[in-house]
Image (cartoon, rainbow, N blue to C red):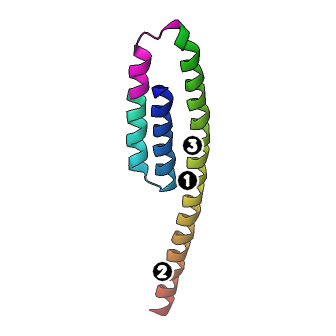
Amino acid sequence: MMLLDTLNAFSGQISSAIEKNDWVMLSEVLTRRQVYLENLLSQDIPDDERQHVENVLKSVQAMDKIFIAEVQFKKSQLLKEFQLVARGQKFIRAYDAVSA
């Protein structure tokens, strides 16, 4: 059960980082989770636990798809905001050029 708890903790941290637009924290959490998973998979997993581990890893993959969709949505929102700011700066420069 510790496996599931640990991966749920990582998922919570990933979700929190995405929600806060904390891309540094997101990168750090993903790196720590990757190391954890690599260590887990480098161990000899008993046959009676193999199916459980496989199911947990499939759920991690499903959550990752959701996280990726969230990040892509945030990216598109940030791009729109950037374009609005850039357009506003362009208008200000044009106004300054005309009024000077």
What residue is shown with label 3?
67
SS under mark 1: helix
| Viewer-closest of 68 and 89 | 68
Disc 2 residue type (three-letter): Arg
Q: CA distance from mark 3 to mark 2?
A: 39 Å
Q: Nearer the viewer, mark 2 or mark 1?
A: 1
Residue 26 place in picture, x, y as percent: 43, 45
Range covered by the magenta-colored residues: 36-47
**Residue under the image location 59 percent in, 37 percent down:** 63
Query: Dot 2 surroundings within 10 Å: few (below 14), some, or many (20 or more)?
Result: few
What residue is shown with label 1?
75
Q: Nearer the viewer, mark 3 or mark 2?
A: 3
Q: Residue furthest front?
A: 1
Which circle's residue, 2 or 1, is located before the other in the chain?
A: 1
SS under mark 3: helix
Q: Is residue 13 left or right of residue 69?
A: left
Quarter that holds the C terminus: bottom left
**Residue under the image location 54 percent in, 13 percent down:** 50
| Viewer-closest of 98 and 7 | 7
Residue 7 place in picture, x, y as percent: 48, 33
- Does 92 appear above or below 86? below
Query: Dot 1 surroundings within 10 Å: few (below 14), some, or many (20 or more)?
Result: few
